[in-house]
Image: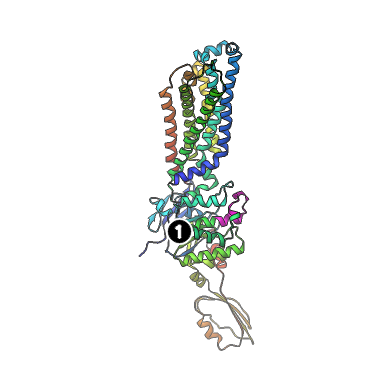
Amino acid sequence: MPAPAIQLEHLSKRYGRVTALRDLSLEIAPGEVFGFLGLNGAGKTTTIRILLDLVRPTTGRAAVFGMDCQARGREVRSTLGYLPGEPGFYGDTTGEATLDLLGALSGDTINRRWRTTLLDRLELGAADLRRPLREYSTGMKRKLGIVQAFQADPALLVLDEPTEGLDPLMQEVFYGLVAEVRARGRTVFMSSHVLPEVERVCDRIGLVRGGELVLVSTVRDIRRLAGRRVRVSFADAVTPPARWPDGWEVIQVNPRDWDLNVHGALGDLAAMLAALPIVDLEVQIPHLEEILKTHYVDKAPA
Amino acid sequence: MRVLVLARHSFRRSAPIVIGTAIVLAGFQFMLTQVAVFLMRNQAFGLLASLIPPYVRAMAGPAMVAFMSFGGVVSLGYFHPIVLASLVGLAIAAGTEPAAEVETRFADLTLARPMARHEVITRSVIVLVVTIAALLAVMAAATWVGLACCTPATAQRPRFALIESLAVSLGAIVFCWGGIALAVAAGARRRATASGLTAVATLTAYLVDYLGRIWDPARLASRLSPFHYFEPMTIISGGAINIANLAVLGGIAVAGITVAYVRFSRRDL
């Protein structure tokens, strides 16, 4: 059985009196796209920096492909590409020099053809690359950041808020890149607070709040957990059942309209409605955003 | 070698300031050779010495006589406070680069690659040594050009060994402060903090040494200052370069670099 792409065991990190991470354990399989969610200051970036050995955990252990991030940091980092939340590019250096420098520091493992493909897709032309980075917009810097992270085609991509500052078209290009590297078996660990993005590209999500991992789930399961909103309209007034099946939540019931939240399979609902004069039936799958907002609000410490 | 890749990047970024400083210092050295020629032609060395107050002459001792000579004026550029400040300033700038990289988050990009943290410090040591050596070589070359091309044959030119000893002595004190800057920067999050602290320490040490030279009760305390071990006047008066002084300055630099390796490898970035 292959080692997990990422394995975090009881990670904690304290900065003086402030606890940034609390007993965080998590496993991510190779080939998975994992979304690491949380509000600002929740501990996402601290976790990423521990993976890169930029920050040392107070207790616990982090490993990448079975290698301890601290003891075998160089080997770990030779397997990954990293996009920081705020890439520290020097304004007096050109885009091309920056990519060359970071490529050389990666150990000359850069596939030039792949790099050209990335640049083409992200619409960073040769003229752009010859300009110093102080002339780049926020979006261009982000695109350059994506190229430097992907250019060595690493086995693991660690991306901190990857689409921050990208326009919608470039966000689409980015999602395409993630899908492509996933198809090649690469693992992606991305932090984000843009929920639709995570919902779209991730297989699983982890929700971190106040340094604690409060939820780990597949996107599919989390939707199932939240249930589906069902709205039924009838041609004539109908009598609602005296007792609703388990897992059904009544939001509003009128003689000609029912508004329900149904957890689990919809078979019972279909059977119940079969004998009734239905005019319209709407089944709404909830967005991750709504579910997680509820999770954040409902389970936040008072 | 990733260290050399990073060092090349640092050299490229610091080239304008280093080249600018080199031009100014070379011009200063050349100018001093011509000032010495002017004073010699006007037989003004004696006059210059008579303008110096007796207590200053008494304090400086025989070194003052050596200084008020053709060779002494030519050598001034190797211990002039402005030259010293320029070179120490550059050494502090080179030594505080790790703090700048943490501050700008450039370190996140470099250290997310298969680089060891000690390579960042090794890079700074390389930059420090090469920059100091290059500037001293340029200064010595400018002195030599000034003496070779535009000096009368009758002038008592200083021996090359004297210029070499002065340059080595100057290099040692500059390297010492570079090592201290590196030790401070290895634990700092901001370059301004690291360079500010080192600059204040440099100025304090300079004043402590100065005080020790002019006021007997402070003589013992002046031993704590690295400038106490920088004695160009002894070299100008014909003394050999003091190996013990070089060892102290080199030892401080090495200690600073060692502290930098340890602090940078243990800290959170």
Colouring scheme applied when the structure was drawn: rainbow
Q: Is the N terminus of chain A in the top left, top right, bottom left or bottom right quadrant? A: bottom left
Q: Is the C terminus of chain A in the top left, top right, bottom left or bottom right quadrant? A: bottom right
Task: Name the residue at 56% across, 10% down.
Answer: B54
Task: Name the residue at 43% across, 43% down.
Answer: B118
Q: Is residue A113 above or below residue B72?
A: below
- Mark count: 1
The type of residue carrying mark 1 is Pro
Nearer to the camera, A57 or B200: B200
Residue A243 horizontal/vertical position (percent): 53, 81
Nearer to the camera, A139 or A208: A139
- Verify whether residue A139 appears in magenta: yes
Residue A215, can we see it?
yes
Residue A127: image quadrant is: bottom right
Residue B267, can we see it?
no
Neighbours of disc 1 within 10 Å: few (<14), some (14-19), many (20+): many
Label 1: chain letter: A
Q: Is residue A295 above or below residue B166?
A: below
Residue A61: image quadrant is: bottom left
Q: Is residue B237 above or below residue B113?
A: above
Left or right of A83 on screen, residue A76: left
Residue A246 horizontal/vertical position (percent): 50, 77
Residue carrying label 1 = A154
Nearer to the camera, B34 or B125: B34
Magenta-drawn segment? A128-144
Q: What type of secondary structure mainly makes up the magenta span?
A: helix
Residue B134 horizontal/vertical position (percent): 50, 33
- Verify whether residue A151 appears in magenta: no
Element marked by disc 1: loop
Residue B69 horizontal/vertical position (percent): 54, 15
